[in-house]
Image (spheres, rainbow, N blue to C red):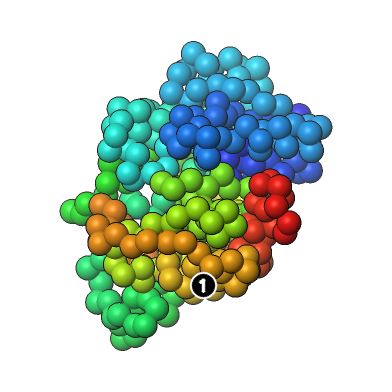
Amino acid sequence: MNIALVTGSAGLIGSESVAFFSDKFDLVVGIDNNMRQYFFGADGSTEWNRNRLEEAYSNYAHRPADIREVSQLEPIFQEFGADIKLIVHTAAQPSHDWAAREPFTDFSVNANGTLNLLEMTRQHCPEAVFIFTSTNKVYGDNPNFLPLVETETRWEIDQNHPYFENGIDEFMSIDHTKHSLFGASKVAADVLVQEYGRYFGIKTAIFRGGCLTGPNHSGAQLHGFLSYLMKCAITGNQYTIFGYKGKQVRDNIHSYDLVNMFWHFYQDPRPGEVYNAGGGRYANCSMLEGIALCEEISGNKMNYTYSETNRIGDHIWYISDLSKFKAHYPGWNWTFDLKQTLVQIHDSMAARLGQHA
């Protein structure tokens, strides 16, 4: 039997992975204990998505285990053993701001939880491919020291800089920089996953995501940029822009396109590799540009305020360079641009909120 195991399976990337791999594996085992509700309250609950998965995919088996506890993980790995061919690890505490509230919780989920999963893989299914969703926050605030130019609606990098054409590559330093505690815990996990690939030969891959997005995101104020932005556009709830005149730039990759990157890697793994993963020059926007698109798609004028206080460690301009991944896997490309993604988010969210799409 071929089994894919997905952590954070009711979250955005986890649920996309379940859907994507359901017809490629005999069984997809999901691990998710809905800690997102603990992090972000009712807005962040993924219970609706777990229910959707269990109804939609007959070969999906849910396990509400806590990745911080080996005692809860080990029975799952013992049950399925070497039949586990793929592990997609998406479970995380994903917010800068929240991490500072509970550093022990943040680190135990992001770093210790990742170590637990790596060690369970090494002990029970060492031939499996292990894919880790890291973050561009491992680069800390180093991107903020690039030569940036202010335009009417965004910050942009100087056109003479090597990063102008394609964005930031994997060789940007992750050292000597302010990460936020979230970024630091993800650095620890990121380096652990690299090490299990390079030291033990496990078929690991690290994907350093920009803004990961899509219609199944449980967006909340502290995490889920486009999803929460669209939720505010639909409901009329107040949205707050934090600093940088609302011109800070994010690239955005649809959850399907990211999971398709995982699939390409799975078919031809390169142990210990690190890839930037985002919308690149294909799909990016500033906060102001994102607000304008949400207003256009929803037909509503957004209710937003501005705070001069930016989030600690926040990026002023970040666009991912995917050249390395595309060179290794030339069959991959983006399928959803920014507007297509936002339309999907709008229609899905409007339906969940019981409003006309």
Give the side of residue 347 with respect to residue 271, left or right: right
Q: Quadrant of residue 294?
A: bottom right
Q: Is residue 303 visible?
A: yes
Residue nearer the viewer, 148 or 299: 299
Seen in the picture, residue 65 relative to 321 is either above or below; the reply is: above
Element type at mark 1: helix
Pick the residue in front: 89 or 350. 350
Instruction: Identify the image quadrant of residue 256.
Output: bottom right
| Residue 263 visible in image | no
Left or right: 60 in relation to 313: right
Residue located beneath label 1 in the image = 292
Q: Residue at x 34, y 82 (%)?
A: 151
- Residue 279 location (% of width, % of height): 52, 66
Q: Residues within 10 Å of mark 1 (few under 14, many from 20)?
A: few
Which residue lies most toward the left here? 176
Residue at image point 45% right, 55% down: 238
Question: Type of residue at label 1?
Answer: Ala
